[in-house]
Amino acid sequence: MTEFQQVKEFILNKLKKELPGYLAYHNIDHTLDVLQAAENIAVHEGVNGNDKRLLLTAALFHDSGFLIGRDEHEVKSCSIARLHLPDYSYGPDEIDLICGLIMATKLPQTPHNLLQAILCDADLDYLGRADFFILSARLFTELKDEGLMKDENEWNLEQTNFISNHHYHTPTSVRLRQSQKEQYIELIKSKISNQIFDGDA
């Protein structure tokens, strides 16, 4: 088993056992989803070798900070990565690069190189996928349960604003996800219009 496979097994087991059960969205399924998306985008963008290993490691750790709490979870994710990655022979420069990748996913996303752009796009890959409404509903449930979102109307307004201002960073994601994402914006806007109409009635 390679060191990457070992660290993958370690962090996935940790997330599975220790993440709070009320996290309907930021759970191990999300981490696996981002991992898969990062791998797919990396293939299309020609990233391989050690760069790909570091990218996928960052994908595994990018939301591990939720083990501690939501606030500043990217910083917490970096702390967890810095604590555990030396045990799997990751060097200081590699860990710095991984933490740079994780921090780039903080909203609003600020990627400064290709690897950061790939992880940012992988983190929000679902915005332009067929399972968008399923995953969106999970995120709404999570935020509502934590008292961060009041109702579906507030959520739809928030979603419209967020998705309208979001843009993909890699040519791969623009090609594969942008068109579908724009269709979802219009669908959510129509829901808001219907809610306003129903409320006036």
Image (spheres, helix red, strand yellow):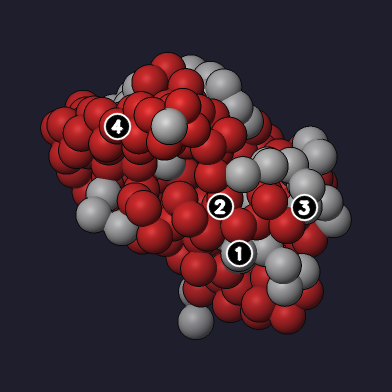
The residue at the point 60 percent across, 57 percent down is 141
In front: mark 1 or mark 4? 4
Task: Left or right? Give the position of 19 relative to 8.
Answer: right
Quadrant assignment for the C terminus: top left
Q: Can you identify the residue that label 1 sits on?
A: 24
Q: Residue 101, percent across and down?
A: 56, 35
Work out whether mark 1 precedes mark 3 in sequence or the reverse, and give the earlier one. Answer: 1
Vertical comparison of 43 with 189: above or below: below
Q: Can you identify the residue that label 2 sits on?
A: 139
Q: Can you identify the residue that label 3 sits on?
A: 146
Residue 50 seen in render: no
Q: Cα distance, mark 2 to mark 1? A: 6 Å
Estimate how packed mark 3 is, as few (under 14), some (14 to 19) or many (20 or more) residues with alpha carbons within 10 Å.
few
Q: Secondary structure at mark 2?
A: helix
The residue at the point 20 percent across, 33 percent down is 183
Q: Residue 42, percent across and down?
A: 29, 45
Vertical comparison of 154 with 89: above or below: above
State the mark number for residue 190: 4
Q: Residue 111, percent across and down?
A: 49, 23
Work out whether mark 2 precedes mark 4 in sequence or the reverse, and give the earlier one. Answer: 2
In front: mark 4 or mark 3? 4
Vertical comparison of 182 with 42: above or below: above
Q: Secondary structure at mark 3?
A: loop
Amino acid identity at mark 3: Glu
